[in-house]
């Protein structure tokens, strides 16, 4: 801007003795009512009638710089402001100015830029301003930060952009919506190409989002995969509105349509969902059955249907709080009473000193929508329970205090909640975690539930039994994927399974461990066959290329009939001295890799791919399974697990909402990776 202003300003010392005044009748813009236009040779100069400043008067320079000067001209502003609207407010804008007289200056600045579009083409050439790039930068900003599309029509925004860059053509809602859709289309093409060239399988997750009311729901379909550089990635594929009354078969058909549009229906490994309405368990079953019929899934689909670990922990935590909601309300009101005045707070502090119940943390009132904050509130209150008892004895206005038994039960429940908080924090410490991270945490919860069910207090034991029912449903669905993922961790292999299972199942553990061992062998064999088929396809392609090079027409040659025989020989014979052990056998026989805090399992498999080519292919598929579809702890502790579409977007057309939600995820992921 500074260089442009310098260019359009004429030296005030220039001799104008022989200059010729150009008649204003030939000048169409009303801005010339405040300027004299003179010509000195081939140079045109505009002289402000108020401050006598000289600016470029060339037609190639347009009138934007003259309008800018009039806004800043002190001599003009010190005079009468009558007639300001004739330069900057016209037509319908004049009505808006009349309604907002207090904002006349703001509106005049805004309309100044809207009324000079006819001159901008010349100005763009002289300044090099790329209107299209600026528009798309604006659209990307709106997508990335979730801003309302209508902000481009806000007065304050237009004034800001006008002052920042007067040459930028301000856009309307329809224009920025179109730009957002174009960005979505381009980014979608990039994602499509990335999925198309993936070396491994893809797992998907399905989340239910809430719309503007209880009747609007969205399904968020995301892909989870490990790319060719061994980076674990998650990309949203579709975000579409559904009717809660839709049947499971209808939803399964919609999801299958999305998968086929992305051309990944034959590349699926697993599917993670919350199984909450409208996405019931039968939806996953129908998709699995359809894919299994075409033999697209490994192990007959045993590893396909998985569920979110965070969801089951969240449900158990909320069940725990619900059983003692009356006690929690009592404590919440007691804390509110203590904080109601300074005098009561001072007396309570004295009781803390008397009972030696000092705590490093002050009492706080929880956020009922986040159960982790309720856990914190109860934990601090338990540290000062003796002070609450004294308050209940000496202050007749205080709220009733829990009994000793209620305090004891509450302490046990808080211990439950603290375990759950630690587990969820471990599950959500990254937006993408490899599947091997979950087994130790889940097993720890399993052991604690067994211990809690043995509590002598019937209240606590019955609560633990109910929680364990929910956990067992999760465990039954996911134990195979969890176990195989931890076996593919070189720090644990079979040893961690062999350690935990006797603690869970006693004498029957060996049989269950054998089942897991058979499953991982079957999975390895299927990957091995897939690898051979791929090699054969590559060889066939090379043969066809050779035949074409030799003038042989493309088609089935006599030698091709022995292709299956070649596969048989490859599978059943070994060359002299060749090690007949499989990748899996070699891997399991080698010593465990030392455990350390900065171990990167994906990098380990990347380095060891040449050593274990087939097993690394299997690890790529298994480790990408999303055992938690909650991306961060920000919403992991919310009592309502459903995320909501923002108010700024949910009123838009469903196709626009999908474009914005998907593009936002893709742009954010791109920024994080760079």
Image (cartoon, rainbow, N blue to C red):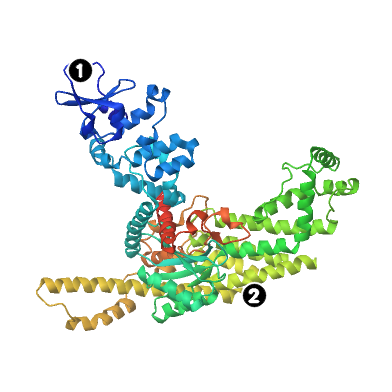
Q: Quick one: SS at disc 2?
A: helix
Q: Locate residue 457: give its quadrant.
A: bottom right
Place of residue 303 in the rendered image (x, y in percent of width and height, measured from the top left): 48, 72
Residue assigned mark 2: 507
Q: Say if residue 260 shows up in the picture.
A: yes
Residue assigned mark 1: 16
**Which residue is drawn at the image coordinates 42% and 53% (left, top)?**
669
Q: Quadrant of the N terminus?
A: top left
Above or below, 548 relative to 660? below
Query: Which is more toward the observer, 54 or 127?
Result: 54
**352 to the left or right of 218:** right
Place of residue 146 in the rendered image (x, y in percent of width and height, measured from the top left): 46, 51
Place of residue 28 in the rendered image (x, y in percent of width and height, measured from the top left): 25, 36
Give the mark toward the camera: 1 or 2.
1
Above or below, 501 relative to 598? below
Label tally: 2
Place of residue 61 in the rendered image (x, y in percent of width and height, measured from the top left): 24, 33
């Amino acid at each position: 801007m500074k260089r442009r202003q310098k260019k359009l300003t004429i030296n005030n010392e220039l001799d104008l003795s022989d200059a010729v005044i150009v008649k204003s009748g030939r000048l169409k813009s009303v801005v010339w009512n405040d300027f004299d236009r003179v010509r000195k040779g081939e140079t045109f100069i505009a002289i402000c009638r108020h401050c006598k400043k000289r600016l470029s008067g060339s037609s190639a320079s347009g009138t934007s710089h003259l309008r800018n000067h009039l806004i800043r001209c002190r001599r003009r502003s010190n005079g009468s402001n009558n007639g300001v609207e004739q330069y900057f407010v016209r037509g319908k804008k004049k009505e808006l100015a009349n309604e907002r007289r207090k904002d006349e200056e703001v509106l005049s600045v805004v309309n100044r830029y809207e009324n000079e579009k006819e001159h901008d083409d010349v100005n763009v050439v002289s300044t090099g301003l790329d209107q299209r790039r600026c528009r798309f930068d604006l659209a990307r900003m709106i997508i990335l930060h979730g801003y309302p599309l209508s902000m481009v029509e806000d007065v304050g925004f237009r004034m800001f952009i006008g002052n920042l860059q007067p040459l930028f053509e301000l856009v309307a809602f329809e224009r920025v919506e179109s730009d957002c859709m174009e960005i979505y289309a381009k980014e979608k093409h990039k994602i499509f190409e990335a999925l198309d060239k993936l070396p491994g399988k893809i797992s998907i997750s399905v989340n239910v989002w809430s719309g503007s009311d209880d009747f609007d729901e969205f399904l968020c379909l995301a892909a989870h995969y490990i790319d060719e550089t061994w980076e674990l990635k998650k990309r949203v594929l579709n975000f579409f509105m559904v009717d809660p009354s839709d049947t499971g078969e209808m939803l399964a058909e919609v999801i299958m349509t999305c998968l086929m549009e992305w051309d990944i229906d034959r590349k699926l490994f697993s599917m993670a969902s919350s199984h909450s309405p409208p996405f019931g368990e039968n939806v996953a079953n129908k998709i699995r059955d359809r894919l299994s019929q075409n033999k697209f899934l490994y192990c007959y689909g045993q590893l396909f249907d998985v569920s979110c670990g965070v969801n089951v922990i969240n449900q158990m935590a909320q069940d725990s709080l619900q059983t003692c909601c009356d006690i929690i309300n009592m404590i919440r009101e007691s804390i509110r009473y203590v904080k109601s005045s300074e005098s009561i707070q001072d007396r309570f502090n004295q009781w803390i000193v008397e009972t030696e119940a000092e705590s490093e943390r002050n009492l706080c009132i929880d956020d009922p929508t986040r159960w982790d904050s309720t856990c914190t509130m109860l934990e601090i209150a338990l540290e000062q329970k003796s002070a609450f008892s004294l308050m209940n004895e000496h202050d007749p206005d205080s709220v009733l205090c829990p009994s000793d038994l209620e305090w004891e039960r509450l302490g046990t429940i808080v211990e439950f909640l603290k375990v759950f908080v630690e587990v969820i924090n471990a599950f959500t410490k990254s937006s993408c975690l490899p599947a091997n991270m979950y087994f130790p945490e889940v097993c720890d919860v399993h052991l604690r539930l067994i211990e809690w069910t043995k509590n002598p207090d019937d209240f606590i034991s019955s609560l633990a039994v109910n929680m364990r029912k929910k956990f067992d449903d999760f465990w039954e669905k996911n134990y195979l994927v969890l176990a195989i993922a931890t076996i593919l961790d070189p720090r644990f292999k079979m040893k961690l399974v062999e350690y935990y299972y006797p603690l869970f199942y006693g004498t029957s553990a060996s049989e269950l461990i054998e089942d897991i061992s058979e499953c991982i062998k079957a999975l390895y064999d299927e990957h091995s066959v897939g690898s051979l088929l791929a090699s054969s396809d590559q060889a066939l392609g090379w043969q066809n290329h050779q035949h074409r090079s030799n003038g042989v027409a493309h088609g089935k040659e006599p030698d091709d009939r022995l292709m299956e025989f070649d596969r048989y020989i490859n599978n059943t014979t070994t060359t002299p001295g060749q090690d007949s052990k499989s990748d899996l056998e070699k891997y399991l026989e080698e010593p465990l890799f030392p455990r350390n805090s900065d171990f990167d399992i994906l990098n380990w498999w990347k380095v060891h791919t040449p050593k274990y080519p087939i097993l690394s292919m299997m690890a790529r598929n298994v480790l990408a399974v999303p055992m938690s579809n909650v991306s961060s702890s920000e919403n992991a502790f919310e009592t309502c697990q459903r995320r909501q579409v923002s108010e700024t977007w949910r009123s838009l057309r469903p196709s626009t909402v999908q474009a914005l939600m998907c593009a936002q995820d893709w742009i954010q992921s791109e920024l994080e990776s760079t």
